[in-house]
Amino acid sequence: MTPVQPTVRLRPMRAEEFPAFLVASRDGYAEGIEQHGGQTHEAAQRKADEDMAAVLPQGLETPGHVIFLVEADGVVVGRLWLAERPSGGRTVLFVYDISIEPEHQGHGYGRAAMRLAEGVAGDRGLARIELNVFGGNQVARGLYRSLGYVETSVQMAKDLAP
């Protein structure tokens, strides 16, 4: 007997859900900056705070941005933050944040959410999705590659002994 796959859908975030999202997204971004970006904890926190304030100046009502909760059979398993933005002379759909809760990882929800993001792009008449991913995030990089994403630039660094 084949296991039944849950129905995964995107639900627009409600205003009362936004404060928790903002904290989780900012903290996850700061952690990535610190772990993979080579910045101190304090610098990573500061950058995350500044970037979030600059990118979402009107919070959930920031024009061009849409934040979804990823649901599997009605259970919230993650979040997906998308926005239209200019890139290379055209408008693209940019993935600012995708996160699946640790207890729900490994079940294909991230893959399903990214496929649903393709539908959002199509609904908006956009023919390209772009995103940034930290170089050390091998799980995410593998997922994106398996979905057909290609690296368009790579930033590298090396710490030197004092």
Image (cartoon, rainbow, N blue to C red):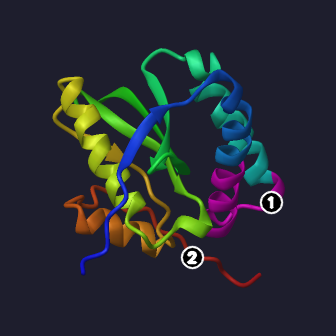
Occupied quadrant, residue 110: bottom left
Over which residues does the magenta segment extend? 27-42
Q: Is residue 51 magenta?
A: no
Q: Which one is closest to the eye, mark 2 or mark 1?
A: 1
In the rendered view, would you say 93 is above or below 76? above
In the rendered view, would you say 39 is above or below 106? above
Circle number at residue 41 = 1
Q: What residue sits 64% from the left and 36% below the top?
A: 51
Q: What residue sits 77% from the left and 49% below the top?
A: 45
**Disc nearer the start of the sequence (2/1):** 1
| Callout 1 amino acid | His
Q: Nearer the viewer, residue 123 or 28?
A: 123
Q: Is residue 119 left or right of residue 29?
A: left
Q: Is residue 95 left or right of residue 153?
A: right
Occupied quadrant, residue 104: bottom right
Task: Give the structural element (helix, strand or loop) at label 1.
Answer: helix
Task: Give the residue pinned by disc 2.
Answer: 158
The quadrant of the image that shows the N terminus is bottom left
